[in-house]
Amino acid sequence: MLKLISPAKINLFLKVLGKRSDGYHELSSLFQTIDLVDILTFETAHEDSVICTDSSIPTDETNLVLKATQLFRRKTGLKLFLKIYLEKKIPVQAGLGGGSGNAATTLWAMNQLAGKPAQTQQLQNWSSEIGSDIPFFFSQGTAYCRGRGEIVNSIPSFPSRSCWIVKPLTGLSTPEVYKTLNKGPLLEQAENSQTQTDLDLFLKKPYYYNELENSAFEINPQLKALKLELQESGFDTVVMTGSGSSFYCFGDGMPPARSDVIHYPAVFFNRTPSRWYEFTETV
Ligand code: C5P
């Protein structure tokens, strides 16, 4: 049996460079893991199964953890099956990468339980086949990502920073947000020259932004109102993460105490190279 933490992520900046011929969007984005986590327990079994604390999450093969077990068997040829207990705390349709982190955690766990037949780099490469955001979780938690998100360049972690994650009860569908963006085709020039500059600019003087915000606001105008409300409460940074619908907030504000909005305190959370994400005494 193996019990592992599966963290959420936020996008400190997210730029959309253009739409690619394969339908995906080319991104330039800085990802950071946070200590809002799910807990996954893995046991070897005769067949795969998932038990989840959140009954709204499907436990059939559409669940990314089962896509991950299938992927691992396909790549390694091993006949290893898992019973997975998913203790969900990360909200879904939130832009927090909960499902992607769960898939990465499953691949890591399965590799451990199989006696480590694969390198972490291989798990990372394989994982892009089942989702654009999954490879990021094999970094140590801070990475500059390009392509459709799957080209991961780890960078040193930042000093820990606390934030609030604020999520309205209504979620957003990732494909719908990208579709609403209605972005023109990718210019090759943008792909090659602009991207490194985005990271350099951020490292010189952090500027938090997300170019998917406007399409999310178009789909659900209440999100824009919530952003304004959070800014007015005193937060100096309020930015949507991923394709929404949650925001991360830095500064001295307070999330609204309303039944249609949930909020979580969080801090940046990284892992050490040879271990998976874990809480230490100081966290
Ligand atoms: O890769 P993933 O399955 O997470 O992507 C879900 C959907 O989000 C894709 O089918 C696509 O519509 C959209 N997407 C995109 N560009 C990206 C990532 C996702 O258009 N870079």
Image: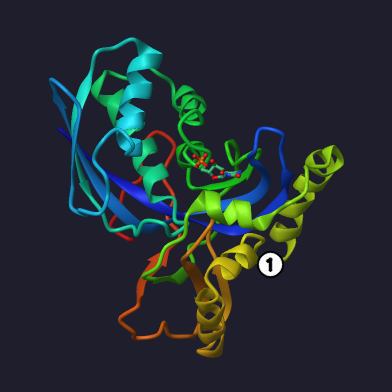
In the rendered image, residue 239, in percent from the top left (x then y), is placed at: 57, 69
The total of numbered circles placed on residues is 1
- Image quarter (top left, top right, bottom left or bottom right) of the C terminus: bottom left
Q: Amino acid at mark 1?
A: Tyr
Q: Quadrant of residue 80?
A: top left
Relative vertical location of residue 163 with respect to residue 75 in this rendering, above or below:
below
For residue 39, say whether it is visible.
yes
- Viewer-nearest residue: 237 or 93: 93
On whether ligand 1 comes within 8 Å of the CB at mark 1, the answer is no
Mark 1 lies on residue: 207
- Viewer-nearest residue: 274 or 47: 47
- Image quarter (top left, top right, bottom left or bottom right) of the N terminus: top left
- Viewer-nearest residue: 180 or 196: 180
Relative vertical location of residue 202 with respect to residue 72 in this rendering, above or below:
below
Tell me if 190 is positioned left or right of 116 in this view: right
For residue 117, say whether it is visible.
no
In the rendered image, residue 268, in percent from the top left (x then y), is placed at: 45, 60
The residue most toward the right is 189
Q: Residue at x 33, y 23 (%)?
A: 70
Question: Quick check: which quadrant has ligand 1?
Answer: top right
Q: How is the image coloured?
A: rainbow
